[in-house]
Amino acid sequence: MSLRELTIHEAHRLLRQGEISSVELTQALLDRILAVDNEVKAYLCLMPESALEEAQQADAAIAAARREGRLQELHPLTGIPLAIKDIICVQGVPTTCGSRILEEFIPPFEATAVEKLWAARAVLLGKTNCDEFAMGSSTENSAYFATRNPWDLTRVPGGSSGGSAAAVAADECLGALGSDTGGSVRQPASLCGVVGLKPTYGRVSRYGLVAFASSLDQIGVLAKDVADAALLLGAIAGYDWRDSTSVDVPVPDYVAALDGEVRGLRVGVPREYFIEGMQPAVERAVRAAIEHLAGLGAEIVEVSLPHTEYALPVYYLIAPAEASANLARYDGVKYGYRVADAVDLDDATRRTRQLGFGAEVKRRIMLGTYALSAGYYDAYYLRAQRVRTLIKRDFDEAFARVEVIACPTSPTTAFRLGEKVDDPLQMYLSDVFTLSMNLAGICGISIPCGFDEEGLPVGLQIMGPAFGEEAVLRAAYAYERSTEWHKRRPPL
């Protein structure tokens, strides 16, 4: 196995044993990026010089720990090369959010999640491509270029964290951070055949995450296997006073939850998540995965989430409304892009937004502004919030009967580039199985569970209640360790 193919926990063991160095590992990943990223286009910004410097510092820390007999205290991410979605701020590094309007923005502050990676002495390789301001399901909405799926370069990697998912799948990093507002970690994880974990809302600080929809956004992780996802989550989770939505609850040892045992675990299967129009290969793979969990001793229980049919319209009222408010700060005055020949402030603001925002961002701003406007607020936004409460209540009632819920992550495997870009409704339907979780604020994971007839990955989604990440990880790990799907790599 080459260095670029290692998982985080495998690389950590080799670093501790002195069999490899972080510099060697980092260089292997940089070489891989140079070899394949012109095709995959996962990265918007690379940091090779600083990454190698960080690797040298990590090697020095490992050597000191070895001399002093403190290897057991070494953080699992020390010396591990990772990637960051370009909507998460890294101080001194360009953060564009995939948008022209932030083309030259360099944040003077650090996201809390990134601070925690620095504290662990992780190595940051660069910033990954994403749909503009995380608005999209295919990473075709980036203002710079479309990312491609490593399994088939004519297909999308999913979105909006498509760059992070593609980088992990193509062995261009050992793990990555993304963000999930309506499925933007889990859906690309499914389409790229990797693991994507969305934590509970409030579990990971949103400080330094550029806002799309503040009541829905959450930083998540993408990894090659469940153990790596547990390590990454453990590193970035925890209370942060700088984020008013951060919840002050203890962070458990997620790796300790990976005992491989699901005997007696009650797994709910929602009837509303197996719908007409779903790709048959996806349904077959997911139902087979659920049967496999039953074979491992889990108790399969049919549950109902009756308000699921309203989740899509509710999401596309609430998310654009919050985006309309959040994106009002981009006025060409304080930071980012500004037209050079404006005649006055009004002209500067109007033309800056016209030229700086892409079509999908403009569409959502208009939808959100309309939903919040006088005369329509009660009919649309307020009613959507009331239905959101009913969706959350559905999950509460289901989790009173079961510990986790299993269902598809995406209704299809990866679709072709350009196939849905001119049909917003079909694109929005790509998140039909993921966005309910964000509305309810709960946690979930997508793991590989099979392939379709064209060799494209299928994802199994396992959802848990608020702060139920341990149960989700335990179920996912038990499935993963008894199957081989996660070990298959794209023929890139």
Image: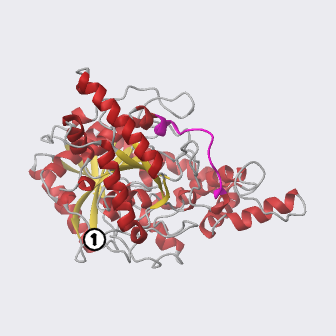
Residue 353 can be seen, yes or no = yes
Between 81 and 401, the residue placed more toward the observer is 81
Q: Is residue 161 left or right of residue 398?
A: right
Q: Is residue 469 magenta?
A: no
Q: Is residue 339 left or right of residue 445?
A: right
Quarter holding the C terminus? bottom left
Between 15 and 373, the residue placed more toward the observer is 15
Q: Is residue 243 above or below residue 152?
A: above
Give the SS element for disc 1.
loop
Q: Is residue 224 left or right of residue 434?
A: left
User: Which quadrant of the view contains residue 271?
Assistant: bottom left
Quarter holding the N terminus? bottom left
Report the magenta stretch's main SS: loop
Residue 403 can be seen, yes or no = no
Magenta segment range? 102-115
Q: Is residue 137 left or right of residue 491?
A: right
Identify the residue position indicated by label 1 in the image: 456
Residue at image location 90% in from the left, 59% down from the top: 344
In the rendering, at what x and y percent does residue 49 appear?
Answer: 46, 49
Q: Is residue 112 magenta?
A: yes
Q: Is residue 179 above or below residue 144?
A: above
Q: Residue furthest right?
A: 343
Residue at image location 30% in from the left, 39% down from the top: 231
